[in-house]
Image: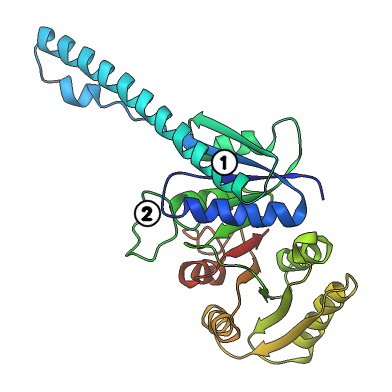
Amino acid sequence: MSGKLVALVDGSDYSRSVCEHAAWLATRSGRSVELLHVIGRRSPAAADLSGALALGARTALLEELAELDARMSKLGQARGRAILEDAEAILRKAGVEQVSTRLRIGDLVEEVSAAVTAEGAATDMLVIGKRGEAADFASGHLGSNLERVARVADRPVFVASRAFHEIGKVLVAFDGGPSCLKAVDHMSRSPTTQGLRFRLVRAGEDSAEARRGLEGARAMLAGAGIEAETDVIEGAPAAAISGEAERWGADLMVMGAYGHSRIRSMILGSATEELLRGCRIPVFLFR
């Protein structure tokens, strides 16, 4: 399979995992990898700091702030280059030959959009850590960058867990919706899935309709030579599926993501968001 995946690295605890998962995806699928590090624009504080000062003092302070800002910008770029160099080394050590790097200053979402639409190999996947440098690990919240990227991404988003572990068992959180069917279709056509064990699970009432949906998805995988178990489990989707992933020993979860919700504050579907927060394994999101 040709194509390219873009991996977002920021120097957080998740960056190594992002690189190692990107390497796993690339070596199994033949994709090239572009490593992207985005330095956010700094908000000028000069007006707040100098507004009450006399003209001479204010001028001197503004000059010092400008010099400080220039130094900080250089340090940020040097740090970004170092992060990209380390990330590239991890990928090449893992056997990925086609690796490129991109350092940008600006808004993350805008730069991700620019990267995936750039000329060259078509980007068909994004890899990002569940949380970044600014995330509160104790809060259990998703990283804000993940939320922003997941909202706008029109490509599959692979959400790396905090540490990489070899992937052998894939749990598909199946709900019968279009994004989930898209995920199953992708799995059926991707060389990444070869040799992996699959389990398709639907949470909720055990009905004939639920079983038919699972059987259709199982048949789609079987048509590509991929055998999959299926089951309907009782309970609220997030809790039931999370428990099943732990019970079965899943190494990767595949699910649909939802860009709109009746609850305006939610960026993903409520069950998707809850699963992402509590899941300790990587998650492959499809829209």
Q: Residue at x 48, y 49 (%)?
A: 145
- For this view, does 153 lie left or right of residue 18? right
Q: Residue at x 47, y 32 (%)?
A: 81
Residue 17 vertical placement versus 224 (above, below): above
Residue found farthest to the right: 223
Q: How many marks?
A: 2
CA distance separating discs 2 and 1: 24 Å
SS state under label 1: helix
Label 1: how many residues lie within 10 Å, few (<14), some (14-19) or many (20+)?
many
Residue 79 vertical placement versus 217 (above, below): above
Residue 227 vertical placement versus 167 (above, below): below
- Mark nearer the viewer, 2 or 1: 1
* Residue corresponding to mark 1: 88
Amino acid type shown at disc 1: Glu
* Residue corresponding to mark 2: 135
Q: Residue at x 61, y 57 (%)?
A: 158
- For this view, does 2 lie left or right of residue 135? right
Of 71 and 240, nearer the camera is: 71
How far across and how far down the image is residue 79, in percent? 40, 33
How far across and how far down the image is residue 244, in percent? 58, 84
Of 52 and 131, nearer the camera is: 131
Q: Residue at x 16, y 20 (%)?
A: 51
Amino acid type shown at disc 2: Ala
Residue 195 vertical placement versus 3 (above, below): below
- For this view, does 176 lie left or right of residue 101? right
Note whether residue 257 is visible.
no
